[in-house]
């Protein structure tokens, strides 16, 4: 009886252009299942595509990363070589600038924790203790000990060495003593409670020390402070020379 009734209802609904209850039941029952099946199929297809093409994409990614690393290395090398060429060009004018005989020598060792470098020039080239070592950018340090064919240069960043320093932009130019504070900064001390320099000022050698000509760049002022209780003032200075980038130095005789 139920079957006959459903058949009659379905026939009547179709004759009237509508959807029968039976068709609605079938659609409601089958549609979610079909949607789930379609979603599952798409997921499986995506997984299979990833499995098939994943290896190729990974290889392509590695290739692109290698190319990027090569380009970065090339740019870094080009920049370093440009700096070296510029430095060599400036070295040609040091003799005329400082009016001293110069000895150009290679750096054989750099010891940042000891604030010194080994230079391949010694008694064989007339090097003596106390001679200043410079480069195109400015002052490096002073010869500390001399061997037959090499010498040890104590760097400006060492607290064991002092240089006379001056700010030439002022009239009269204030002068003080400068030495290393740490491996990154220098300390310039003035015998006056009034700070005579400002941030950004360039500091030069004063020329008051024997063998060290006036006007060699030391560095740039980072900060300055007054110490009235001490009757003095001081300034922190960033050195002009990055020793780690050097390959050779000039010793002024």
Image: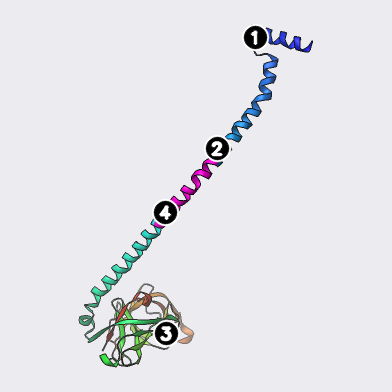
Instruction: Name the residue tied to disc 1.
Output: 14
Q: CA distance from mark 4 to mark 1?
A: 64 Å
Q: CA distance from mark 3 to mark 1?
A: 102 Å
Horizontal side of residue 20 vs 225, given as left or right: right
Q: Secondary structure at mark 3?
A: loop
Q: CA distance from mark 2 to mark 1?
A: 39 Å
Instruction: Name the residue tied to disc 4.
Output: 63
Q: Secondary structure at mark 2?
A: helix
Q: Do the residues under discs 4 and 2 have CB atoms within 8 angstroms?
A: no
Span colored in magenta: 48-66
Q: Secondary structure at mark 4?
A: helix
Q: Do the residues under discs 2 and 1 have CB atoms within 8 angstroms?
A: no
> Which numbered circle lies on residue 184?
none
Q: CA distance from mark 4 to mark 2?
A: 27 Å
Mark 2 or mark 4, which is nearer the start of the sequence? 2
Q: Which image quarter holds the C terminus?
A: bottom left
Looking at the image, is mark 3 or mark 2 nearer the viewer? Answer: 2
In this view, the residue in front, 244 or 124, is 124
Mark 1 or mark 3, which is nearer the start of the sequence? 1
């Amino acid at each position: 009886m139920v079957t006959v009734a459903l058949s009659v209802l379905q026939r009547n609904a179709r004759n009237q252009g509508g959807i029968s209850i039976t068709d609605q039941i079938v659609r409601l029952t089958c549609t979610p299942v079909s949607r789930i099946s379609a979603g599952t199929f798409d997921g499986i297809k995506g997984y299979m595509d990833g499995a098939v093409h994943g290896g190729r994409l990974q290889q392509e990614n590695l290739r692109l990363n290698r190319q990027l690393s090569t380009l970065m290395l090339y740019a870094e090398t080009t920049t370093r070589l440009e700096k070296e060429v510029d430095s060599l060009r400036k070295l040609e004018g040091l003799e005329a600038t400082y009016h001293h005989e110069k000895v150009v020598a290679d750096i054989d060792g750099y010891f940042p924790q000891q604030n010194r470098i080994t230079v391949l020039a010694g008694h064989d080239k007339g090097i003596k203790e106390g001679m200043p070592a410079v480069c195109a950018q400015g002052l490096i340090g002073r010869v500390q000990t001399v061997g037959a064919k090499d010498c040890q240069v104590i760097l400006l960043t060492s607290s064991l060495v002092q240089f006379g320093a001056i700010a030439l932009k002022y009239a009269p130019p204030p002068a003080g003593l400068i030495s290393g504070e740490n491996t990154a900064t220098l300390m310039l001390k003035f015998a006056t409670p009034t700070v005579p320099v400002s941030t950004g000022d360039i500091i030069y050698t004063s020329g008051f020390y024997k063998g060290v000509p006036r006007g060699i760049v030391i560095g740039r002022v980072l900060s300055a402070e007054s110490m009235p209780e001490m009757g003095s003032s001081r300034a922190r200075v960033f050195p002009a020379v990055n020793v780690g980038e050097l390959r050779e130095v000039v010793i002024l005789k």
